[in-house]
Image (cartoon, grey):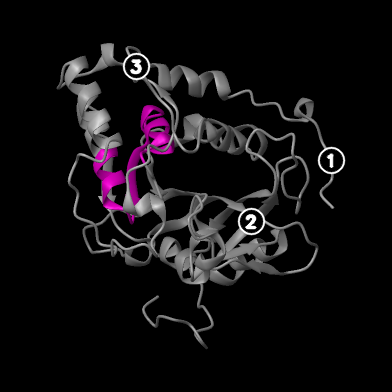
Amino acid sequence: MTKSYSVDDLNFLSVPLLQRLLGELQVDHLKLVTPSQFEEQINRFIRNEVDVPENLPMDPNQRIQSLTFHWGHDHDFGSFKVSGSLGTRHIWLLSRFFDHFGLDPASLKQQNVLDVGCYTGGVSLLLAKMGAEVRAIDEVCKYSRALDYVCSAFGLTNVTAECRSIYDLELKEADVRMDAVFCLGVIYHLSDPILGLRRMFNVMKPGALICLESMAVQAESRICDYYGPSRRKGDFGWNWYVPSPQTLYQWLEDTGFEDIRVGNGVWDFEVTADADPVGPNRCFATARRKATHSMCQAGLSSRVL
């Protein structure tokens, strides 16, 4: 059973900062298009009128976010507002890491930061407004295209939005290693979370920080609840393996991370309660990349680590 806590136990001191930064992304700050042009293009995305070729098959077995466009996060652009599937979740997730896991927002300035599963960019935009150099990836091309448009319209040159799967992350000779990685609401959607974590490990600097958030099951043991796509067919999205906090800890440990902290921000190794702004049954984690770590390769789905 999840330990109880109230909203009074959650001191989200960074929320006003995050709201102020989002307030700077209103139409009176546009650089390259007019407010009417911007609103029309955003509505074209929402109406599925922007033709973006996808790398995923477009058939009924895919999640609805892959088949049709769904705006990710609530945003007030000043002259108009958009409502997203995830509401204001981007604000509360980042605030949890700043206010309860000890991450200083100022420490992200001029840092190379990876946002995995960026959707339409709620988190990426906030990180960019904090001064980070953001690499944002999503396996659904229509979302990285929408984020790229928003960044271009506002003249945000410190965001690179890519249509790329986490499994395709690689470090080429000219690439810059990441100082931090945000992987929020993604890990339980992966059929191979161990490989996904190792792909992120490979593009990080030694000592770099990873911030994770996941749907979770409350248990003291190392277990996962297996969903599989057929269990949620037609619902919001697909889940694969939903870990307990102890499992999330060991996933990080096995793939090469240290200084691991897992919990809901109030209690270690606990999931969130009903009173939490992010909703119940969620878990957060932070960890640092080891300088080197040789993974056990027995049974791995890829030899390229």
Label 2 is placed on what type of residue?
Asp
How many discs appear?
3
Q: Which mark is residue 4?
A: 1
Is residue 218 inside the magenta stretch?
A: no
Taking 201 as reference, is 269 above or below it? above
Where is residue 16? Give x, y as percent: 55, 18
The first of marks 3 and 2 along the sequence is 3
Where is residue 64? Give x, y as percent: 40, 52
Q: Quadrant of the C terminus?
A: bottom left
Instruction: Give me the C-alpha separation between circle 3 and circle 1.
Output: 39 Å
Secondary structure at numbered mark 3: loop
Asked whether, in this view, residue 73 is left or right of residue 147, the answer is right
Residue underneath mark 2: 259
Q: Which residues are magenta?
A: 120-147
Label 1 is placed on what type of residue?
Ser
Residue at horizontal 49 percent and vertical 71 percent from the top: 192
Q: Is residue 199 visible?
A: yes
Asked whether, in this view, residue 227 is left or right of residue 151, the answer is right
Estimate how packed mark 2 is, as few (under 14), some (14 to 19) or many (20 or more) residues with alpha carbons within 10 Å: few
